[in-house]
Amino acid sequence: MTNQSITHNVDIDDVNIEQFIPLMTPAQLKTELPLSEKAHQTVLEGRKTIQNILDGKDNRLLIVVGPCSIHDVKAAHEYADKLKVLADELQDSIFVVMRVYFEKPRTTTGWKGLINDPDMNDSFDIEKGLRTARKLLLDLNEKGLPCATEALDPNTPQYIQDLISWSAIGARTTESQTHREMSSGLSCPVGFKNGTDGSMTVAVNAMNAVKSGHSFLGLSSDGQVCIIKSKGNPYAHVVLRGGNGKPNYDETAVAQAENELEKGKANVKIMIDSSHANSGKDPYLQPMVIQNVGEQIQNGNKSIMGMMIESHLKGGRQNIPDDLSKLEYGKSITDGCLDWDSTVASLRNLRNMIKEQLANR
């Protein structure tokens, strides 16, 4: 090989790249913030419980509840402390997992989440974001609270997946081959949302693809780009989130989803997302969806295994102000959320509706 052949050809190579910034490896972050014994047990027990719910061995309902996205660690801790008390109260009928989302897919532009931009000022200090995210997940698991997140960037799981009990693949990425391959190697159960148009086809295809092993490019714990060979993930399921401006949580929609899952030879266990198109993006319609799911279970439904709820200390949402000191504490900066008191009332009501029926599921 001549010197000329290995010279960086700036006129044709990386033309639109401004800078390469080295990042710590997953192994380095895990050494700095290692998994504690308490957190380890919380993750193991959380994953096993969710697997048992999907297998029909545990009749409780899985509830993934929490902020649309995490932007304030202090507020996340306050929310988690309240949620842990509620989770203990409801544990005979409901298994609670906290929604701890750090990456936000954007339709066009906007804040991309705590990992990408922890300072909310377009500085994109991703190393700080990863460190903040891992520390928060460690703390929450040490409280005994299992955590859920959306797996968006295919490299991020190596940094935090050992602290996650349940992962979601969003409606925009369910059809992505990259995300299906990644999900086939994730260590926890994965929920695939139906397409943004409301169709089930992409989710069914994704669930079947994920059951198989795949070979794909990815990152090892020591930061080496590798060919990753996965075993396949047997715990993929669908999340109905509505689509095309229409809901798909009612009895008729659930029956249609059951038929499509059976026809596609996919797992006929369904999670209902009470937010997004199912509530018309109005967070205060989420209790109506929760109530409807409770009624379906009362009426003998056996396919609904869980729900997802967007909830925060305060209801609604806010834009990110130029002066970050003016952010309202405990309120979402992405999708609107249900306030804490309404969340408690809805989940207590759901528990009271379904607790007698669970033994027959």
Image (cartoon, rainbow, N blue to C red):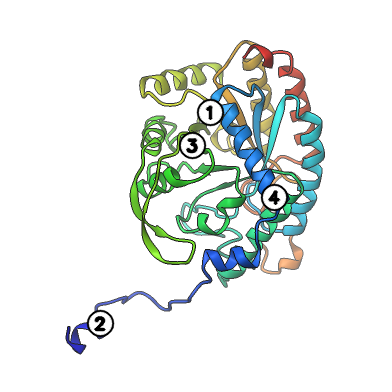
The amino acid pointed to by label 1 is Pro
Q: Earlier in the sequence, mark 2 or mark 1?
A: 2
In the image, what residue type sits under mark 4?
Ala
Q: Which residue is under mark 1?
A: 247
Q: CA distance from mark 3 to mark 4?
A: 28 Å
Q: Are marks 3 and 4 in contact (CB under 8 Å)?
A: no
Residue found 42% across the figure and 35% down from its top: 197
Front residue (pair 327, 98): 98
In this figure, which residue is indicated by the disc labeled 4?
39
Residue 104 relative to residue 285: left or right: left
Residue 255 place in picture, x, y as percent = 49, 17
- Nearer the camera: disc 1 or disc 4: 4
| Residue 331 visible in rendering | no
Tag nearer the camera, 2 or 1: 2
* Residue 3 can be seen in this image: yes
Q: Is residue 53 above or below residue 173?
A: above
Q: How many numbered markers are drawn?
A: 4
Q: CA distance from mark 3 to mark 2?
A: 42 Å
SS class of the residue under badge 4? helix
Judged by depth in the image, the label closer to the viewer, 1 or 3, is: 3
Which residue is denoted by mark 3 in the rendering?
Answer: 193
Q: Are marks 4 and 2 in contact (CB under 8 Å)?
A: no
Res 11 label: 2
In the current view of this chain or complex, which residue is farthest to the bottom?
3
Q: Amino acid under label 2?
A: Asp
**Disc 3 or 2, which lies upstream in sequence?**
2
